[in-house]
């Protein structure tokens, strides 16, 4: 299912005041599945009475609109189609618009960009899809690579049999172990090109998978950090002293996609 979410950048009356809530649009069927379970019976009935008359608005995308607290403690149905760009004499208070593929409203908390930063590392925790171990295949150089980790590690040994061996590794962890094997002849320019290789892998990952594309864009302008003590180059070193290059390249990829910048 698809839920349209609007991430506000400021308060309605004081544009210098950030707010900790966001707007959600949904069809009745979408709302019934993802939003109504969070509402009291009274709020459900209220949302029905507040549903807008679609005939009164030019090309409305959805008839249901809700103001949702970031922690989901308050979900308020609204009687107008609030997040339209022509509100307030053409001023739009929304910094982001995203279509999120979700099953429950709870999942929107994962996407909300209102916090100061997004930290990720473990594959099966929030934002695990940012990990290079995430099971999203990419197509580069005329071949399919099971994960971005497979591609990144293999490019340490381009034009050798190790490149193909790593591509065929059973898991991203195995690919990483093979790529970090000091007995293998690392390409001479690896330190110079490794950021570009990661950039290429991330761009492929987040443009070739529409669901990931939407999740990345839905993070707005929030800082993305690979939070781990295991890596002070690609990650933050666990205490913020690391370079966080993976997080920086993810944010760069987000901006490229947002602006439609090609390879």
Image: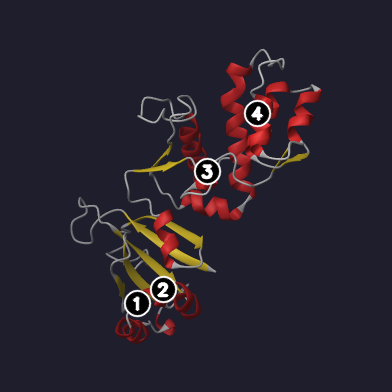
How dense is the environment of label 2, judged by Cα within 10 Å: few (below 14), some, or many (20 and up)? many
Q: Which one is in front, 54 or 42? A: 42
How dense is the environment of label 3, judged by Cα within 10 Å: few (below 14), some, or many (20 and up)? many
User: In the picture shown, does residue 152 fall above or below 258?
Assistant: above
Give the labeled residue for mark 3: 130
> Cα distance, mark 3 to mark 1?
31 Å
User: Which residue is drawn at the image coordinates 39% and 54% (left, top)?
Assistant: 112
> Cα distance, mark 1 to mark 2?
7 Å
Can you give x and y, in whole percent of width and height, for residue 87 in the image? 31, 66
- Between disc 4 and disc 1, whose residue precedes? 1
> Cα distance, mark 2 to mark 4?
44 Å
> Seen in the image, is 10 located left or right of residue 167?
left
Q: What element carries label 3?
A: helix
Q: What element carries label 2?
A: loop
Select label 2 or label 4 by which is in front. 4
Q: Pointers 3 and 2 in contact (CB under 8 A)?
A: no
User: Which residue is drawn at the image coordinates 62% and 28% (left, top)?
Assistant: 197
Q: Pointers 1 and 2 in contact (CB under 8 A)?
A: yes
Image disc number at residue 39: 1
């Amino acid at each position: 299912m698809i839920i349209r979410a609007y991430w506000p950048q400021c308060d309605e009356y004081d544009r210098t005041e950030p707010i900790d809530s966001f707007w959600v649009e949904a069809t009745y069927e979408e709302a019934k599945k993802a939003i109504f379970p969070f509402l009291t019976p009274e709020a459900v009935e209220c949302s029905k009475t507040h549903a807008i008359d679609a005939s009164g608005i030019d090309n409305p995308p959805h008839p249901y609109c809700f103001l949702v607290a970031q922690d989901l403690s308050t979900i308020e149905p609204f009687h107008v189609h609030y997040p339209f760009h022509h509100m307030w004499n053409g001023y739009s208070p929304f910094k982001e618009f995203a279509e999120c593929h979700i099953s429950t409203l709870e999942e929107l908390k994962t996407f909300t960009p209102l916090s100061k930063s997004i930290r990720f590392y473990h594959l099966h925790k929030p934002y695990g899809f940012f990990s290079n171990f995430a099971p999203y295949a990419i197509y580069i150089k005329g071949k399919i690579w099971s994960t971005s980790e497979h591609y990144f590690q293999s490019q340490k040994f381009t034009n050798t049999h190790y490149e193909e061996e790593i591509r065929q590794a059973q898991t991203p962890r195995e690919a990483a172990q093979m790529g970090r094997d000091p007995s293998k002849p690392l390409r001479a320019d690896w330190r110079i090109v490794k950021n570009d290789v990661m950039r290429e892998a991330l761009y492929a990952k987040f443009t070739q998978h529409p669901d990931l594309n939407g999740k990345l864009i839905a993070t707005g302008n929030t800082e993305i950090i690979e939070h781990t003590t295991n890596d002070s180059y690609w990650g933050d070193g666990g205490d913020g002293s690391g370079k966080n290059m993976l997080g920086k390249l993810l944010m760069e990829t987000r901006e490229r996609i947002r602006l439609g910048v090609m390879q």
